[in-house]
Image (cartoon, grey):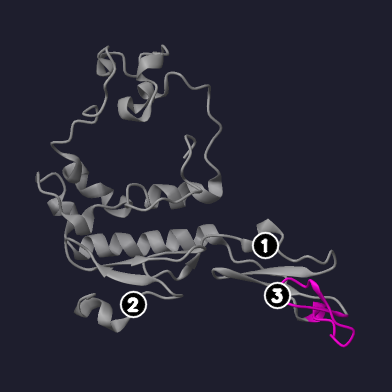
Amino acid sequence: FSGYICDSSPCQNGGDCRIADGGGYICDCPKGTTGTNCELDSLDECDAKPCKHQDAICEDKLGDYVCYCPLKYAGKNCDIYDPNAPSQLDKAVHTKQDVNSYFAKDLEKQRQDCLKHNCPMKRGNNRCDEECNKYACDFDGNDCSLGINPWANCTATIKCWEVFMDHKCNEECNNPQCLFDGRDCEKELQPCNPVYDAYCKKHYANGHCDYGCNNAEC
């Protein structure tokens, strides 16, 4: 049962709709898509070089890709020899959508939703408002994190919270349960990939693992 909000099928491109705890809906998007309704392209499938023939042209699609094959080759990846297959190279479109501009538009749309849900007034009211607990709404002023001890599962013999981010590496605290000693044991990190930066900020702590963001840099 998905609820009447999902009956209108707001999620695009094969996304699954579910009811959010605080009202509204959330779209669980398939790989390669993102956005409130899974309407945005978040992955260039051509980066994996799926087209097998060296002369084939790969075109990125929303959550997919198309290989335009040269003469006498066919198939999804141009890996099938067919003496009767015509060339498709003239059909290739040499354009690519600006992913960052889509992220910016989607972020602005989400910020408008924050205003519609009156999130600025709810921020810091010591109540977790799920509809506001996202990057665009400033994570409800951290109201959804109140009462949680971040070191509750830390079993180190030393008090890791007392040496947290002291610029000294305490190996006993360098684990997920002890918050990696505030990154004191890491070398200087490279910046987060700019293609992922805005996306990772927007989808931080949303309950889903985004592999492009699952690293220390992001």
View extreme (bottom): residue: 84
The Cα–Cα distance between marks 2 and 1, rounded to whole angstroms, is 28 Å
Q: Nearer the viewer, residue 172 or 161?
A: 172
Residue bearing mark 3: 76
Numbered disc 2: secondary structure: loop
Residue 58 image-quadrant placement: bottom right
Numbered disc 1: secondary structure: helix
Q: Which residues are magenta?
A: 72-90
Image coordinates of residue 92 in percent, x first then y, are 74, 76
Number of other residues with Cα within 10 Å of mark 1, as a class: few under 14, some 14 to 19, many 20 or more: some
The kind of residue on which mark 2 rests is Pro
Label whose residue precedes the other's in the sequence (1 or 3): 1
Number of other residues with Cα within 10 Å of mark 3, as a class: few under 14, some 14 to 19, many 20 or more: some
Q: Residue 201: within the magenta?
A: no
Number of other residues with Cα within 10 Å of mark 2, as a class: few under 14, some 14 to 19, many 20 or more: some
The kind of residue on which mark 1 rests is Cys
Specify the quadrant that holds the N terminus: bottom left
* Residue sitting at x 21%, y 42%: 142
Which label number is shown at residue 10?
A: 2
Which of discs 1 and 3 lies nearer the camera? The answer is 3
Which secondary structure class fits the magenta region best? loop
Label whose residue precedes the other's in the sequence (2 or 3): 2
Residue bearing mark 1: 46
Q: Is residue 25 left or right of residue 97?
A: left
- In contact (CB < 8 Å): disc 2 and disc 3: no
Q: Is residue 111 left or right of residue 50?
A: left
Q: Nearer the viewer, residue 19 or 78?
A: 78
The kind of residue on which mark 3 rests is Lys
- Where 162 falls versus 76 (above or below)? above
